[in-house]
Amino acid sequence: MTMQSIQGVFAERVRETPDAIAVSAPDGELTYAALDAGADRTARRLWRHGVRRGDVVAVHAERSAAAVVMLLAVLKAGAAFLALDARQPFERRQTILDDASVKVVLSPPHLAAEMSPHGRTVLTPDDGVQADDDPAVVPAATTGPDDIAYVAYTSGSTGRPKGVCVPHRAVLRLVVGTDIADLRGDDVFLQFAPLAFDASTWEVWGALLTGARLAVAPPGQLSAAELTAYAGREGVTVMWLTAGLFHQVVDTGLDDLRGLRCLLAGGDVLSAPHVARAVAALPETTVVNGYGPTENTTFSCCHPVRKAPTTPTVPIGRPIRGSGARVLDERLRPVPDGEEGELYVTGEGLAHGYLGDPGRTAERFVADPYAQQPGARMYRTGDRVRRLPDGTLEFLGRDDDQVKIRGFRVETGEVESALAALPDVARAAVVVQRAPSGERRLIGHVVAADGGHLSALDVRERLERVLPDYCVPALVRIVDTLPLTANGKVDRAALAAASVLDRPELSAPHRAPESPLEHAIVQLWTDHIGVVGIGADDDFFEIGGHSLLAVTILGELRRAYGVEISPRSLYLDPSPAGLARAVAEARSRS
Amino acid sequence: MTNPFDDPDALYRVLRNAEGRYSLWPSFADLPPGWDLVLADRPRQECVDFVEEHWTDLRPAGPVASGRPNHGTGG
């Protein structure tokens, strides 16, 4: 039988092992049969509310077994799911819902109230006790491999996030008969990736289409130690970690992960020493560098690391089954092995394109001049690579403005557009800077419009309302002008070279800000002093503050909180915590 | 180095395949097999605008995407 859809393959697993555990999570455990029945009930509810094949249904849920039921229910109704990221600001979620013309949002009862309808229907899943179910109503959806399974939004350079439309075919190519790992029915997959990001495609459907168990980590933030402890307790055998988290896990200790068969890491450049330590500490585990843009469905290339790398970089490996890779020069000719070129990916994993954006789709998903099958397309990744003597690919960098911040893909153009759209902002430029720790951070520069006045606190607050936190610059500078190059473009190199300091050793130990007020004041100091990593107990003058800056900062606090703080109280207690206390006291008096 | 698809000063073409999908294509490169030329040698933005105007459904044209019920065994 040819594979038609995700839910079609899932149905085969239900027939084979109905009583096996499909999902285990803090909110409950579901067998394959129970997951199937629960998703059917909710699919019927969606169908009764008019959801049909080709629609996009948003799923607004935290990590849970219930969320997995909802994703499957949307597919069973014949629609595509759009998983919202609860950490994203409200306005951005609305933008995304509007962009995807979402009419129905599926959300558990305790989160449904968060979704203001805006002309949309907000539904809760059918938990089996409502009276409105009618098992005779079966969604008459005939899903084919070209139907869209999900829409995943990524940062867009022109200031608008873009929705990548991924068909069922692409997901099946990722997890059915894959050569990424030898998946088995007795595997346990960790589910930790946010459902809005496509690493979760691998986790969720890798488990459920294999007949394995999906172990859903508790919702919310987990430390590296909490995560590995959970994985150890649950007997996880297949696990994905974004690069930053992978490095933390290696640093924290791998003892809990000895039961892993496959540890995939990626999403950003992996540190070779960390990979070497993981390989040495986990002799029974295949450590895999997984590479790929969302546009080619989670993974394009994988590199299993069999022995500790001695090279400074970890290759991204070879294309996975069902995918191809071409390394081309600026005239679209294949480059000789060993020479640098741009990576183009091909095959079954390609998304249809960007929702409602055919122009951008035709720019990125282009004709493949070397395809065996006439009329095939390739996706240009924007990544620079070269082919090594053993045939694996090595990642060398990018030649555009896309960066990874804490593993998340960010277009600096999107951040610039968001800054420039704020009231009283004339121009904005965002550059990327690499901290001594190797971590990248965004530095924003804004110029006030004529006669306008800008407050760093205000700029940051407004930005946090429209951008996810990883897109908000670590430091926002208010400047009089942006430096220009000889041909009149913003001189980004000069901006990037302008020094931003990391917090030096200070007399006070570093204490992270706790209250919202402490956070706001630390950010205000960061923006005005140009030092990143300020602690709540740090001394204003010790980290480079001076009286002029003090006046500016107190002025910002006056406008933001309507309180008058005397310079004297800053001098007497010159820390963010002290200033927060002064603001709180002044507010309680007024 | 400018990507051949991102050169603001170069001329481009618009191609379309049998599934009704469109591709921007640099004018210097040969026509790839399976693609028809639908707009020849114009500035980049003009080509993008042309695609915006003519490509209405991103899904590949054919029995599946047109939603005919006789296709497939269903979910």
Image: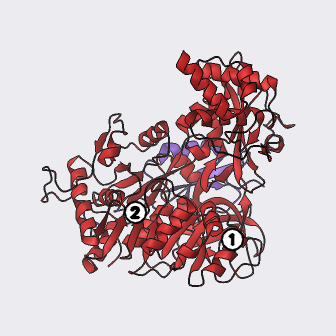
In the image shown, does B42 or B23 lie closer to the viewer? Answer: B23
Residue A104 visible in the picture? no
Q: Are marks 1 and 2 in contact (CB under 8 Å)?
A: no
Chain to which mark 2 belongs: A
At numbered mark 2, what does the secondary structure look like: helix, strand or loop? Answer: loop
Estimate the x, y position of residue A355 in percent, counting from the top left: 47, 49
**Residue type highlighted by circle 1:** His
Chain to which mark 1 belongs: A
* Labels 1 and 2 positioned on one and the same chain: yes
User: Chain A, which colour?
Assistant: red
In the image: residue B75, left or right of residue A418? left
The quarter of the picture where the N terminus of chain A appears is bottom left
Foreground mark, 1 or 2, reads 1
- Mark 1 = which residue? A274
In the image: residue A445, left or right of residue A422? right
In the image shown, does A448 or A326 lie closer to the viewer? Answer: A448
Which label was assigned to residue B33?
A: none
Looking at the image, residue A158 lies above or below residue A24? above
Quadrant for residue A315, please give it. Answer: bottom right
Chain identifier of the purple chain: B
**1 or 2: tag closer to the N-terminus:** 2
Estimate the x, y position of residue A353 in percent, counting from the top left: 50, 55
Quadrant for residue A590, please give it. Answer: top right
Which label was assigned to residue A146?
A: 2
Between the residue at mark 1 and the residue at mark 2, the CA separation in whole angstroms equals 39 Å
Looking at the image, residue A431 lies above or below residue A418? below
Residue lying at 67% horizontally and 67% vertically, measured from the top left: A270
Residue lying at 33% horizontally and 71% vertically, measured from the top left: A22
Residue A581 visible in the picture? yes
Estimate the x, y position of residue A412 in percent, counting from the top left: 66, 44
Looking at the image, residue A385 lies above or below residue A92? below
